[in-house]
Structures are given as C-alpha cells and as structure tokens.
Image (cartoon, helix red, strand yellow):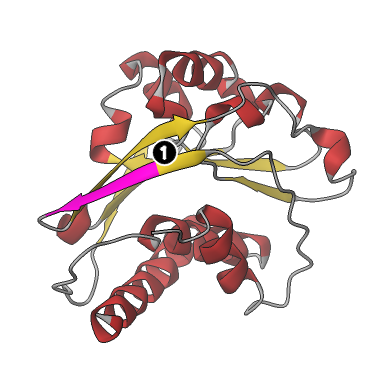
Amino acid sequence: MDLGGPRVFVEKVMYTYPVQTVFVDSSPARVALDVRNGVETGSIVEEEYFHNIRSYDYGAGYSHILVTTVSPGVVDLSSLKGGRLYVDIQGFVRGSRGIDHLESNIEHIFCLKGTKKEFGMLDPKIVDEAKERQVIITDGENGSTLYEHHTKTIIMPKEVVDSPHTIGSGDTMFAHYVANQAMGKNAEESLTIATQHTVSHLHQIVEQE
C-alpha cells in the first residue's frame, strides 16, 4: 500500500490554514508499514543515507519549520535555522544514526513530538532538556502530554475512536499543532485543537474502511 508518506497528510492540513507554506521534498525512501490490532509499525526497506535537505532548500524568513520524515538520512537538522524547528521523531528513531543525529542537534529544536514508545528510545537526559522548550508525547486513547518550561499538561480527546489503524494521525495532529502555533495560539490551545482534528481524521479512516 502506497500512501505517499507524511507529506500527504501534512499538506492536506496546511492548505486549510491562512499561513504561507513551502514544502521541501527529500529523496524517496521505501518503508514497510505493518498494522496489527490497530498498532502501526514501520521499517525502512530501502533508502539513500545522505543529508539532502538543508536551510538553502527553503530560504530564509520562515518562522516555523516542521520536519517529519520516514528516514533520518535526508535531513541535516543543524542547518535548519532561521525559525522555530518542530521535529517529529518517528523517522529518527528507526536507526542508531538517526537517534544520534537527533540527540546531537537537540539545542536547535524548539519542539519534539513522538509517541510514548518512540521517546523511550531516546536518552532521558536529552528528553528532559527538550522539556524546557516543548515536548509532545502521544499515547493513543490516553491523550497527549505537553511539556513546556517543564510544566506538564495532559490533553485528552473528547472521544475515543475505534479505528482499524492510525496511519497519518500523528502527521495530521502535528501539522495542525504547528499551524496553530504559527497563527499565534499558545501550546495548550494549539494541542487541544490538533487533538480534535485527529479525532476527525480517525473518523475518516473508519468511514473509508
């Protein structure tokens, strides 16, 4: 099944907001997705491991930069400067090289987002450092935990959707979150809005099955 990767979901969201958006594509990577009992896991089948997305690919002047990738090898986080950097860790935890690259550039990152399982793969000290800025830990029906300046806030969905899978839900949520941040909303409000849009996304999956 070819769903097109994270960009498909992010692009769908961003075009619903009045914010100027530029998309930068990397070299392609083939990823195998396995969904069992509603739980999604992914592994890289084939990739070219080199950094080919850098700051000059999008130019200067962008206040918010969202990084979501299936492969860590295409993004040089150290060069993405000029705005707040929001990083989905899902692609980076698929290998030791990606984890090392992420952790060594933690000071450049404004917001880290990932599942509870994904954050368990990172050095706890690195995660604690990131909590001074923003960290979003998602945990399915248990909601999302937001850390900002080490203050913990739990955002719960208004309903739990019995969806056959959750493909695209993380990208959808994070795109809504960053878009609302770009529009000036605070972190808690942004995550609350993003969570409700994720519920709508899961309803769409149910309807399409």
- In the image, taking residue 197 as reference, residue 119 lies left or right, namely left
- Which one is in front, 136 or 45? 45
Q: What are the residue bounds of the magenta stretch?
A: 32-36
Q: Please tell me whether residue 33 is drawn above or below residue 140 in the rendered image.
A: above
Q: Please tell me whether residue 182 is drawn above or below residue 15 in the rendered image.
A: above
- Which one is in front, 151 or 125? 125
Residue at 49 percent across and 14 percent down: it is 97
Q: Position of residue 84 (x, y in %)?
A: 68, 42
Which quadrant, please, contains the N terminus? bottom left
Mark yes or no: residue 42 visible. yes
Mark yes or no: residue 136 visible. no
Question: Which three-letter amino acid code belongs to the residue tagged 1?
Answer: Gln
Q: Please tell me whether residue 4 is drawn above or below residue 40 in the rendered image.
A: below
Q: Position of residue 179 (x, y in %)?
A: 61, 64
Q: Main secondary structure of the magenta part?
A: strand
Residue at 65 percent across and 76 percent down: it is 17
